[in-house]
Image (cartoon, rainbow, N blue to C red):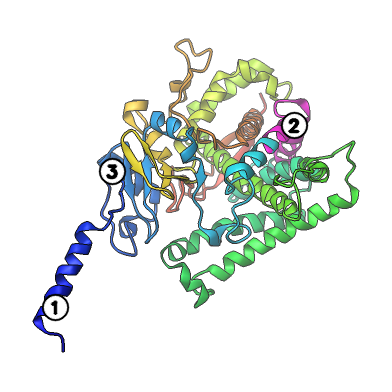
Amino acid sequence: MFSMTVWIFIVVGLLTYLAFKPRKRTINLPGPWALPFVGSMLEIEPRMYLTLHKWSKKYGPMCKFQIGAGPSTVLIADPIIAKEMLSLDPFVGRATVKEFTLFEGENIGLINAEGKIWADQRRFTVRQLRDFGFGKSSMESMIMEEVNEMKDRLLAYKGRPIDDIKNMLSLAMLNSLWSIVAGTRYSQDDPKLRELARQITGAFDEAAKAGAVLVLAPWLKHIIPGLIGYTSIRRTMRGLVDFVSKTIKEHKETVQEESPRDFIDVYLNEIKRTADVTSSFHGENAERQLIAAVADLFQAGTDSMSSTLNWALLYLLKLPEVQRKLQAEIKAVTGNSRPVSFSDRPKMPYSLAVINEVLRKAAPPFGVPHRVLVDTEYKGVFFPKDTGIMINLYYIHSDPKLWGDPENFRPERFLTSDEKGLEKTENLNPFLIGRRQCPGETLAKDTIFLFLTNLVQKFNILADPNSPEPDLEPAVSFIVQSKPYQVVFQERKD
């Protein structure tokens, strides 16, 4: 049994150690309380973006919070700070949950890679997609194939209500991307296209279901993987890898270096001619990089474009005066005697303003989180290595100081005073900003423009009179998703 003297020495020694041991610097920012093991998780609502909005409103343009027992995340709610930070070297890392990556724990591809791998992959992808037709007739013709099939499918309904317009849009977006990436176009009824769509949406759905548990207690995947959703996530990821791998194998058997047909062909040619052993296009891992890049293009592009168009149709359905003004501009430019084309954009500022307003109201509420690569300081605040950085786009896009009346859907806010052009603004950032800005931004904007204007030229977008009135209140979801709604596409005669 220890004597009192021994206990005194133990206590004094412990207090001395605690008093003089080196203290780890912390992030000197306000934020919600963080409990051991769960952090600020208990405060988060099902619509997480509303919680983040509340925190930014309460704690200011930079605040911190913690999810689980991992590093803190700094939440940025100011567009100027966001633009500056995300352009600095220490802030271009990528925060990931390894269980959600395509190849578990491997930060490769376009979304999750860092350093030289990320820089090389991004530079190559942007260049090749641009060369394949950003703003050129070849890209326009690919997108218009999907627009025309969409119009035909909607005409076949003959004015009957449609209850799965989001799914129809998703298939069209996926098919458009697939023709660019893999050189193949399917009918929207083709089982292969629907299987690819199932794999992509399944990856999102399974990650959303299992997210909280795997962030808080990732070790549970070794004990009860099925119960916490880990098994489903990995099965879905393997299915997506298998689908893309099969397509790449088919390309390897037929690729011709002098006449590449699509993005996959160009990438395979780059692998073949790369001799630099330090390049991510060299060696046995190069094909894994290609698989990840293709999967990233689909995962990042399909849902965001279809969700934006889905919201655009819902707003036009609810706001007929906006729809009529949009149709009037389209008719003034095209005479309704031909489809809308890329070349019409400079003459269609209101159409572009409508798209901007939809993006402001319904874009992803926060970008993919960044990670601090090294201990650093910014504006007098210390950021330890591995701190997460999240941009609160939902707050920025609904800040009254920036927009005046953010609750209203008012495309005119983006127009010049004479309504003949677009005002430049740095406050709208649906594709994020800085060095990790979305590489598919131009493609997404082009696709949304051609789909929306050509559908509105052909149809009146109406509510189904025999169904409940559609609701602009978002569904209970991790992101800003619309509730399901019934819509009627009435063919226009004028």
Under mark 3, the amino acid is Leu
Q: Residue at x 50, y 34 (%)?
A: 358
Instruction: Give the label on residue 139, or none.
Output: 2
Q: Residue at x 47, y 14 (%)?
A: 416
Is disc 3 in contact with disc 1, using a CB cutoff of under 8 Å? no
Q: Position of residue 369 (x, y in %)?
A: 47, 46
The number of numbered discs placed on residues in the rendered structure image is 3
- Tell me: residue 454, above or below residue 110: above
What secondary structure prevails in the magenta region? helix
Q: In the structure shown, which secondary structural element does the residue marked by tag 2 occupy?
A: helix
Q: Hey, which residue is sitting farthest bottom in the picture? A: 1
Q: Which of pointers 3 and 2 indicates the residue nearer the eye?
A: 3
For the N terminus, which image quadrant?
Answer: bottom left
Per the rendered image, the range of residues in magenta is: 125-153
C-alpha separation, residue under disc 3 versus residue under disc 1 = 39 Å
Under mark 2, the amino acid is Met
Under mark 1, the amino acid is Trp
Pick the residue in front: 148 or 352: 352
Residue linked to disc 1: 7
Q: Residue at x 69, y 19 (%)?
A: 343
Residue 394 in view here: yes
Judged left or right of residue 271, residue 236 is left
Q: Which of pointers 3 and 1 indicates the residue nearer the eye?
A: 1
Q: Position of residue 134 (x, y in %)?
A: 70, 29
Residue linked to disc 3: 29
C-alpha separation, residue under disc 2 versus residue under disc 1 = 78 Å
Q: Is residue 82 magenta?
A: no
Closer to the chain start, of discs 2 and 1, is 1
Q: In the structure shown, which secondary structural element does the residue marked by tag 1 occupy?
A: helix
For the C terminus, which image quadrant?
Answer: top right
